[in-house]
Amino acid sequence: MVARRQNILVADDDPVVREVVRRYLEHDGMTVTEAADGNVAMAALQNRGAGIDLAVLDVMMPRPDGIQICRTLRSEWRSDIPIILLTALAEEDDRVLGLEAGADDYVTKPFSPRELALRVASVLRRSGGRSAEDTSTLRDGVLEVRLDSQAVYVDHVPLELTAREFDLLAFFLAHTQRVYSREELLEQVWGWSFGDLSTVTVHIKRLRAKLGDRHRIETVWGRGYAWGRTDSPNEVAQNAD
């Protein structure tokens, strides 16, 4: 049986951007659904028949913008569909805002279409590319992470995480008692050899918030993050950024 081609929603009010991105993604064997504004994008995401596998959303498009759609997907619809934001905003605070809304990744305009296509492939691989043979489960007290189904449970209650949040948590549980810098986490979890380190910081913050008092992500000053280290209290600040 021929596998279904992955369907990427590209939502941007600039037809040139949509055309260029569509050609690159189709060259990589993907199907593209285009949307010229937020309302069309929302309709496509609500249409189960469309089978959207990943959404590329422009932050500045009208009715509603990419960040508003991202918030709706994560907070109201409880959707874990991977999201990449396109933004022309250069300030770090604006990029962080998109990540805090629940985006998995972002690309700053002007961007290389090839870079965006590679980011799409990377996020898709991380969100659904685990081996069918990977049936192991990671546990820490009442926290349970099932790698085969990408499900997380706290006291047997399911916890909703995005694909990146899941990968970050699974990485920590598989590599306890070791400090990882933001650069190392960016490479190990995101698969990037370079990038904006605030991406890691925001995802750490989001993961801590969702896990509440069940998280054991500790900040080791000047070095990075670790899960459940036992260093002295003076070195570790559990709730710091």
Image (tube, helix red, strand yellow):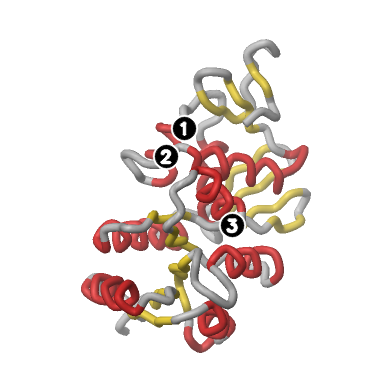
Q: Is residue 34 visible?
A: yes
Circle 1: residue type: Arg
Dots 1, 2 in contact, CB < 8 A: yes
Q: Which mark is residue 230?
A: none
Whole-number angstrom distance, CA of label 3 to CA of label 2: 17 Å
User: x and y percent of residue 33 in the render?
Assistant: 40, 82
Q: Check disc 1 and report its element: helix, strand or loop.
A: helix
At label 1, counting other C-alpha atoms closer than 10 Å, the crowd grade (few under 14, some 14-19, many 20 or more) is some
User: x and y percent of residue 165 in the render?
Assistant: 56, 50
- The residue at which mark 3 appears reads as 102
* Occupied quadrant, residue 162: bottom right
- The residue at which mark 1 appears reads as 182
Whole-number angstrom distance, CA of label 1 to CA of label 2: 6 Å
- The residue at which mark 2 appears reads as 186
Residue drawn at x 57%, y 28% as measured from the top left:
226
- The numbered mark, 3 or 2, whose residue comes first in the sequence reads 3
